[in-house]
Image (spheres, rainbow, N blue to C red):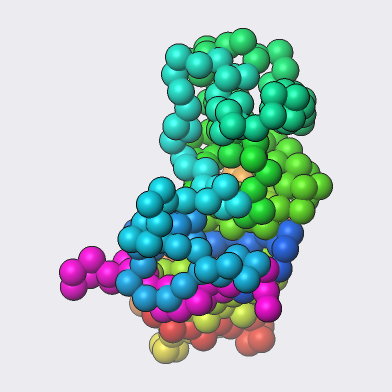
Amino acid sequence: MSFLSIRHLSKSYDAQVALHDFSLELEKGEFISIVGESGSGKSTLLRMVAGLMTQSTGEVVLDGTVIQNPAQKLVPGYDQIKLIHQDYQLFPNSTVEENISRPLIQYDADYRAYRVNLLMRQLGLENYKDRLPRQLSGGQQQKVAIAQALAVEPEVLLLDEPFSHLDSIQKQRLIFELKEILTEMGTTVIFVTHDLDDALRLTDSLLIVQKGKMVQRGNSRALCEHPKTRYVARLFSSINLIPDRFNSYVRPSDIRLRTKGELMGHVVDQRFLVHYNSLQIRLREGGHIWEVDDPARKYQIGDRVYLHFDEEKVLVLKS
């Protein structure tokens, strides 16, 4: 039996289904990122896993114990499963140290002091322990929220887009720090986000959801090279519809530019990116606009180009 079992969870509001039949098995210390657009049921899933929302069907089992929902438990939630939201939910008139120690109020004073000091040191908050949340940056506030959740040493940590308010530099640094801490602690982690880059910074184990349904699971290479749907494919890059071919696409990076050939077009736009120029090319056939990578930075707006791709790179995708 897996350490964390999510079995056939679903949630409906009247006639609207927020989450369809969802199952997932995770071992102790395993990380997974669940990626999906807003409204795809990610937050609903986490709240049910944490025992904070009553499901329509299914159950959650942690290390052999069934997680009770609010209809079954007087005080919803479990210390073993902690949910971190994108809004920090800190106590505004309590210091950093006080915020982190609040979940430990019933614990031995020596252990409480040890645990708070350890977390402040691990998350680089020692110099801010006497500050109020409003005196901190967004990244520092998020660290306090994480420390508060980790105070009781949960076995499962659920991350509900907690980095969405941070800039990219803050996000990269915080995700890296958090990954190190959680790996050392052996915590099982489910991270939900709409941002594939954020997901991959934490783990290469991905699960894609759309409109409340599980679409595909795998590592980044498998999902990029063998996506089942257009939605999964577009998480990794733009895709170009091949003229006169049903549901067949090719990625911008899989197209080669030549000075002669059969599929001809003209460059109508050019953008300088870090590793290549991104070209917008209007095809002569049908007037379609393709996005194409130009790693040699050779072509300019107005140039005539011929586009080539290998058949093995063609993606045949469902809608």
**In which quadrant will I find the N terminus?**
bottom right
- Is 270 or 54 nearer to us in this picture? 54
- Locate residue 78, reporting x and y percent: 53, 51
Across and down, in percent, residue 231 comes to 45, 70
Residue depicted at 62% across the width and 10% down the height: 130
Looking at the image, the residue that sits furthest to the right is: 184
Q: Is residue 216 above or below residue 156?
A: below
Relative to residue 212, is residue 208 drawn left or right?
Answer: right
Q: Main secondary structure of the magenta part?
A: strand
Question: What residue appears at the point 61 percent right and 26 percent down from the top-left corner?
Answer: 101
Tally the numbered discs.
0
Give the quadrant of residue 176: top right
Q: Percent x, y for residue 13?
A: 23, 66
Image quadrant where one finds the C terminus: bottom left
Could you tell me which residue is drawn at 38 percent across and 52 percent down?
A: 74
Residue occupying the point 46% across, 72% down: 59
Instruction: Give x and y (percent) for residue 250.
Output: 55, 75
Name the image quarter holding residue 212. bottom left
Residue 307 vs 318, above or below: the answer is above
Query: Does residue 181 appear left or right of residue 5 in this picture?
Result: right
Q: Residue furthest left?
A: 14
Magenta stretch: includes residue 263: no
- Magenta stretch bounds: 1-24
User: In front here: 109 or 135?
Assistant: 109
Q: Is residue 304 visible?
A: no
* Left-right relation of 7 to 148: left
